[in-house]
Structures are given as C-alpha cells and as structure tokens.
Amino acid sequence: MARPETINRMLMALVMTLGLLAPLNGHAQQAPITDEQRRFLEVRRRQIELKAARTQLQRTEELFRQGLVSQTELDRARTAVEMAQLNYQEAVLSLLSLQPRISVRQAIKYQTRDGRKWVRLTVANLTPTFDDTQFRLLSNFEGADPIPEALRTRTVRDIFISLRDAGTPGPNGQPVSRGTTIALPYEVHIPELKYGQSRTIEFQLLRDVQSVVVAASYKGQQQEIQIQLQQAETENVVTITATQISQEADLGSQATYDLRLERSTVDVRRFQLKVLNLPRQISYSFLDPETQARLQQINFPAGVTEQRLGLRLFLPERADADVRIDEPLAFWAVVMNDKQAARFSQDRHYTPEEIRRSRVGAVRLEIIPRGVGRIEVSAVSLYSEIQVGETVATNLTIRNTGTRRLDNIRLTAEYPLNWRVELVPDIIPALEINREERVQLKILPPPDVPVGDYEVRIKTESYAYNRRVPSEDKIYRVSVKARTNVWGMAGLIGALLLLVIGIVVFGIKLTRR
C-alpha cells in the first residue's frame, strides 16, 4: 500500500498540473494550439510521468526490503523509471529543436556617389522562446533533470546570410537564374544572434534588381525569404539612371538611351520630362518602351517605384557651330515636378551645380556626332553611239556629298569580254566635303566587235572614318553601229542625181514639142 503522504503529494501535483493546463485549454478554444505550446505541454506531461515512476520505485524498494515484493517487480519499477527518463529527455530535445526564425526587418537599396548600388539589410532573431513563468514551471519539480538554459535564450549561432537573384519569369513561367548570388560579399557570417537582437549588414549589388532572395543558413537548415527592396530616401524625389551614358551617332540618324526611373515614395505622383543643354538643332522624344508612344509626363501609380523610358535624339543632316563633328556634346535628362519645371528654360545652359541644387532627378548623358561619307558619280551622259572601230571618251565627276572627308577612293569597271576600259585617275587619295574630282573615262571596244548594245559598269569604293562608304554603281551604255561605205554611198547619190537631171531634161524637151 502507498503511504498517505506520498499519495497526498501526487494528488497535489496533479491538481497543480490541471490548474496550469486549464488556462491553456480555455485559450485553445479561442485559438489553435501552436506547435511550441504542444511541445511545452509534452515536456510537462513527461515530467509528471517521471516523477510518478520514481515515487513508485521508492515504494517498491521499501516493500522489497520488507520482503513483500519480488525481485522481478523491483526490476520492473526500475525499468519504468528509465523509460520515463528517456521519454522526458526526448520531449526536452523536441522542445529544443524548435525551428529558429530569422526575420528580415528592413532591406533598403541606395546608391553611392560613384554609382554603385548597395543594400542595407537588417535581420533579427525572432525564434519563439519561453518566459520566466513557463521556465520555472518546467524546472520546479523534484527529481527532474535541469532544463537547458538555451530554452530561455534561444540564441542562434553561426548564421550565414547571402543575397540571391529572385529570377525572372521564363517561357514556361518558371523563374530563370533564380538562386544566383548577386551581392558582395557573397556570404556574411554572424557568429551569434540572441533572441530579439538585430544585426545590420551591407551588401554591394553586382546586378541592379528590385527584389532579392535573402538566404539564411543556420543549424543545418536553409531559410529563403523573397523581398521587394525599399528605395532609400534621397534628396531627389526621383532617381534616374541610364544604361548607355555616352553614344556615337551619325549626322542625320538617331540615338536612343534606355532610362530607368526610381522613387522612394509609394504614393501617386506625376512628373515632367525634359532635356537640358541640348542644341535646338537636335530634337528629342521620350518614348514608352512598349508602345513607343511619345511622352512629356510620366505617372507613378500607387505602389509603383520603378519605371523605364527611352530617350531618342534626332541629329541634323549637317554640322554647325553648335553641333560639331567628333566633339562630345553633354546634356541632361531630368525628371521634375511642376514647381521645379517652372525654374528651367530651354533657352539657356545650366551648370552641373545648378542642376544638383535644384533637387531634380537628373542623369548626365553624352552624344558624339559623327560625319557621314557619301559619294556621288555623275556624267553629262551615260550613253554613246559609235561605229565599229571607234572608241568612247568622256568625263566622270566624283563628288563628296557627305559630311566627312572621303579617303582612298578607288574606281573600277566591269566590261564585256575583249573590251578595255581606262579610268584616269583610278585612285583618288582624299576628297574633302563638297569637293569634286574629274575622272577621264575611255572605252575601247575590240576592232571586230559585233553590232549591238553593250554595258560598262562603273564601281566606286571609298572610306570615311575607317568605315566603308556605300555607293551606287553607274552603268554606261554603248550602242555599236555598222561602219558606213562612203564611196559606194557617194556613187549611189551621184547616179540618183544624174537620173533626176535626165528626167528633168527629157521633160523640158517634151514640153517644147
């Protein structure tokens, strides 16, 4: 029989346990029990079982000493204590293995003066923990092993943090290049992060993106959180960047710059678009990259922090004092609100300091006009009629109608078999803008050339700024006629004249009769 004091202690422990579990059961009706609470209750239940098993072992040992129970019953009681001890240790280990939680508090992207992009990342240890009351409840009973202090602190050690690419949707909808590390350092080691403690880390982005995957490795597990980066507050409401800062373009052609606009606020805003310090000879248009619609203003809907635009310049056909060949021309693409736009005029030149003080979104761009080489070949006539045995001699005019000097102009000809064509000179070393050069063309058919129409193709090849200049071939047509017999023709004409004279004389005589 059990001793009365032992039974009383067991009843008191049971009443205390039921009293502690009652609030939890009442709370469970309002909200589901979490995994942490369930494991906590499991440890408490194993504590009670271990305590009861040890009490039973003490009673069995006392009865064995009195000779009231056998050795087998004593061994069974000892085995029950060992099993209860094992179950209790297993419950404690399960409670200790609760998954730590590393949370991202903040991820702000900002740009330094040298143009590099950075992310300021703040992480915190929000692993579920136990308060003092719960910890004392687990620790305050007789015969129980001590509860590890780690249950209270929940400190996470050896955390490795990296930033990875969130990926872009591919043809099948799956992210492409997801998981690639895109920031320096590739991995940051945090030796220890206590419960509730935060840590701020800075990464340099190797690729400018709007969202990243924060990968955290600790305690043999991986945690990935995809987040949208927050734009840092700057002096400018909008930050504008360009992929192509400096470009070359031929006169009479176009140049397009890809622009990206970012802002730190998420409210609805409307901005004006302008280009400053650009000569009037060069016109421009801001374009929507998808619809190619021309824009003067851009609207940021609520929640949109990034937009893309195209800036297209139209260069004039000719250079002048403001647009000079091979000289860089700097200008600014700016984004501003209505109040800021009233301060700027297209009629004057603004210094970089004035633009920076205005607190508008601006990016400095550059265009380098390049001259275009054009060659023109002309002649008074590109057609000749000759007789068999004759030659063609004429002049060609080579003119530079472009905006850059032509170099190494070479003239060649394609002609029928057994013909000869002479071009003098056949090489012109250089030809300045709006200048011309005369070339003598001589076509020599063979002596026995058949009667008919023939073609001689004149080709020109030249270079301007080490680039080949396209040119149009000219075709000279030659019509070869049969040679006329002069003496036979003269005799025929003479005979015809004599015949006419004879008819006239005969008619006169006949009239007199």
Image (cartoon, rainbow, N blue to C red):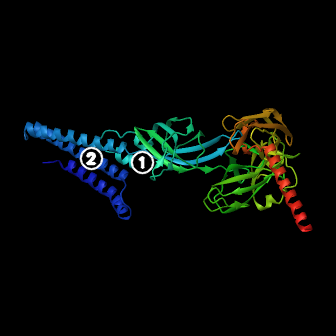
Q: Which residue position holds label 2?
A: 46
Judged left or right of residue 501, residue 469 is: left
In the current view of this chain or complex, which residue is farthest to the front?
Answer: 513
Residue in front for this viewpoint, 379 or 409: 379
The percent coordinates of residue 285 (x first, y second) are 74, 56
Nearest to N terminus: mark 2 or mark 1:
2
Check disc 2 and give the amino acid type: Arg
The percent coordinates of residue 77 (x first, y second) are 15, 41
Can the viewer see residue 237 in this picture?
yes
**Within the image, what quadrant is residue 444 found in?**
top right
Judged left or right of residue 59, residue 382 is: right
Check disc 1 and give the amino acid type: Phe
Q: Which residue position holds label 1?
A: 130
The percent coordinates of residue 235 (x first, y second) are 73, 50
The mark found on residue 394 in the picture is: none
User: Which element type, helix, strand or loop, lies under badge 2?
Assistant: helix
Can the viewer see residue 402 in this picture?
no
Residue in front for this viewpoint, 509 or 203: 509
